[in-house]
Image (tube, rainbow, N blue to C red):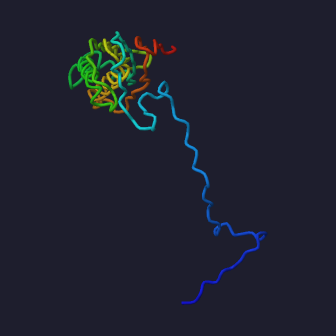
Amino acid sequence: MGKKKIIKRNKASPRRPETIAPRRAKTKAKRAPLMTNAELTHIDPRGQARMVDVSAKNMTERLAIAEGRVIMRKETLDLVLAGNAKKGDVLGVARLAGIMAAKRTHGLIPLCHPLPITKVEIDIDPEHALPGLLVRATVKVTGQTGVEMEALVAVSIACLTIYDMIKAVERGMRIEGIRLLEKRGGKSGDYRAEP
């Protein structure tokens, strides 16, 4: 085997881009600044997901209200309000689904705590101007963490149930505007969405 020929380059001579090897950094790359617990409570100091330890928190009354809308044709809304859907009582089934969903939130959202919910109320009202249905969930607990996720999950599942109950009539319905309207209690204080 022959010896490898070493070619010395003049420092002034340009290299072709495809032959330039990337230089290794002499210092370690800077890490992005870590978020504080106040910003992301479900992330530990190493950036890993965790369930927040709420054992040191006081038991206080907490409440959350969320809303969402199911937008449909006027004819579909009239059918629902008349109680003539083939699958039965659309609004009654959707209310029940929302209540059940609130109670099972910890099984759906990985880092939620199981909570002894004391109240779940689902209100479904027609909005003829849309046309469609406005769904609101109110969830209450006396505990060490809030029920925002329970309210949001309740609204989401109630809206999906409405869709399921009448999709044979109209598959083009839209579920929109799911959001937290209000939160009360806890260390972070009260919150109210802007109108």
Res 96 → quadrant: top left
Residue 80: where, in percent of width, then height? 29, 19
Residue 26: where, in percent of width, then height? 62, 55
Report the residue at 69% width, 79% height from top.
Answer: 7
Quarter the N terminus occupies: bottom right
Relative to residue 4, is residue 25 depicted above or below? Answer: above
Report the residue at 64% width, 68% height from top.
Answer: 18
Residue 102: where, in percent of width, then height? 29, 21
- Please state the total of marks drawn on the protein image: 0
User: Residue 118 versus residue 9: which sits nearer the camera?
Assistant: 9
Q: Is residue 157 left or right of residue 31?
A: left
Residue, far right = 12
Residue, far bottom = 1
User: Residue 52 versus residue 71: which sits nearer the camera?
Assistant: 52
Residue 77: where, in percent of width, then height? 34, 20
Res 163 → quadrant: top left
Report the residue at 41% width, 19% height from top.
Answer: 131
Residue, far top = 61
Relative to residue 120, is residue 177 depicted above or below? Answer: below
